[in-house]
Amino acid sequence: MAETGKVGSFWHDTITTPPRRWPALTGNIAHADVAIIGAGITGLSIAWHLVSAGKRVVIIEADEVGHGTTGSSTGNLYSVVGPRLHAIAKKHGEQTLRAVIAARSAAIDFIEARVKELGIVCDFERVPFHLFSAPDAAAAKEVQHEFDATQRVGLPSSDAIPASFPFRATALTTVADQAQFNPLKYVIGLAAALADRGCSIHENSRVLDTEDGEPCIITTATGRLTADDIVKATHTPQGLYAVHAAMIPHREYAVMARVNDALPPSGIYWNANSAWRYSVRPWRTAQGNFIMVLGEDHKPGEQDAAQLDRISQFLHQHFDVAEIPYTWAAQNYRPADLLPYIGRSPLEKHTWMATGFAADGLVWGTFAGQLISDELRAIANPRAGIFSPTRFTPIASAKNFLLEQAAVSKHLVHDVLSYGRNRECAELAPGAGCVVTIGGEKVAASRDHEGRLHVVAAHCTHLGCLVHWNPLELSWDCPCHGSRFDMDGRVLEGPAQKDLALAAMPDPPRPDLPS
Ligand code: FES
């Protein structure tokens, strides 16, 4: 495998002053107007608007503020989107495209305003966004289509290729006045400001159950809360929801290299070429000059070692790499019709969701703050219908929906038939994992780097797909809707609410289970 360095997000090592911490939810606490599950950028942005309007808000976080997807994101803030503006225009029309641009631009402005108002030191910087391609007809067409779309919606864009452009490019779309920041420092600052304004925050409080009702009830292992409304700001809503079938989970690698070179000008550089479809960003920090490369997306549990090797190869070809100290992966959920689901949950009266952000979640999550808080306060928002989870767009999303359902069916059936014959299970090396059959039951066995064996039930607790081993992050990942579990079966992320059960060890050892 490639030189992966430390497996973990760069942002966590930039927090040099210990942030404020908040107590776990214990006992029965006072009724809230709104309970928000998840203290990432989405939950905190929603809370900001509600607290500013005088609402009593309680935020419940399974881990610590920003330690989920926000702390594993890449700090990009742009009005454009990963699925491309021209693709949104094709599916939904120019009017919707303009609404998308307006929503995302306003979200970036909101972040910039909070950074200034609250004095959050998070390296916020306005930078240009570049989408480029080297000789490649399909990629050049994509870049041209995107330039045309940016011009139609009035973004400050250019297709001129300056002589100083740091990569080989034969087609380029540059959008000025986009931004980047340190997402973890931002949400830590926002959480502190919210607490100062009376918002209750509870960390290390995994929600085990929610009941939609009057009142709504939220239960954790140690506490219970009632609220008028619940917002599930957990990246993908936990539990069973139709939107899970309309989103495709993906994971993408981020690799951070310390380089000896002078860095290219600040900016977001996206390569549209099919071979190296990476996003590259220079970062000047107190620790040195870094290049961050993002890419090699794959479904959870379907990664391969060659993907990290390719990123490493790219880095070495383009830069004088001193070391690669950070490698991590982040998950995203791609909606079949390219637009996120933000609003009231279908079939529920007081439960709200914000999901399907693809790889553009920092901006979508901030926009969700405005939209959901408007709806909770009965303020008409003209964009509510576009992003409503209840929308039904069979023409726009049918193909992707059916493809995804076929993929889920494949995992439900194919995995059950094929797993258990894996000969690698006979000798399970440290850092390896495999699914085997014990007494007719599929179990997921893995060995940690200290040599200890961990065995858990192999069927995902969400809808029963078999989990796959992720050797980089030592986790069990479900390819169906993206739930992830640690070696001992504890939920890490995704729609699953229950842990994988610990499996009984066979006694005496059986030949089909590694010792
Ligand atoms: Fe749905 Fe695993 S996440 S079955």
Image (spheres, rainbow, N blue to C red):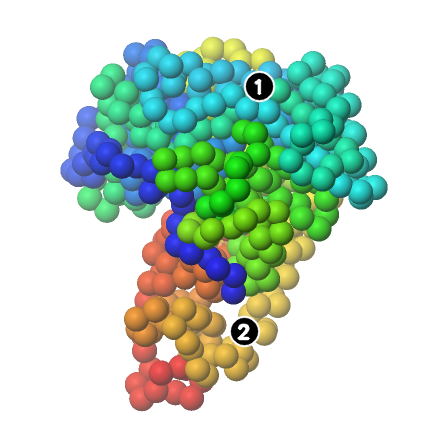
Furthest toward the right, the residue is 137
* x and y, in percent, of residue 71 in the image: 40, 39
Secondary structure under tag 1 reads strand
Q: Nearer the viewer, mark 2 or mark 1?
A: 1
Name the residue type under label 2: Tyr
Residue named by callout 2 = 419
Image point (19%, 26%), residue name: 30
Furthest toward the left, the residue is 27
Pick whichever, 390 or 44, lies toward us.
44
| Lower sequence index among marks 2 and 1 | 1
Locate residue 189 relative to residue 328 in the image: left or right: left
* x and y, in percent, of residue 228 in the image: 33, 24
Q: Is residue 404 above or below residue 488?
A: above
Number of marks: 2
* x and y, in percent, of residue 25 in the image: 21, 37
Q: Is residue 345 visible?
A: no
Pick whichever, 35 or 132, lies toward us.
132
Secondary structure under tag 2 reads loop
Q: Which mark, by number, is residue 177?
A: 1
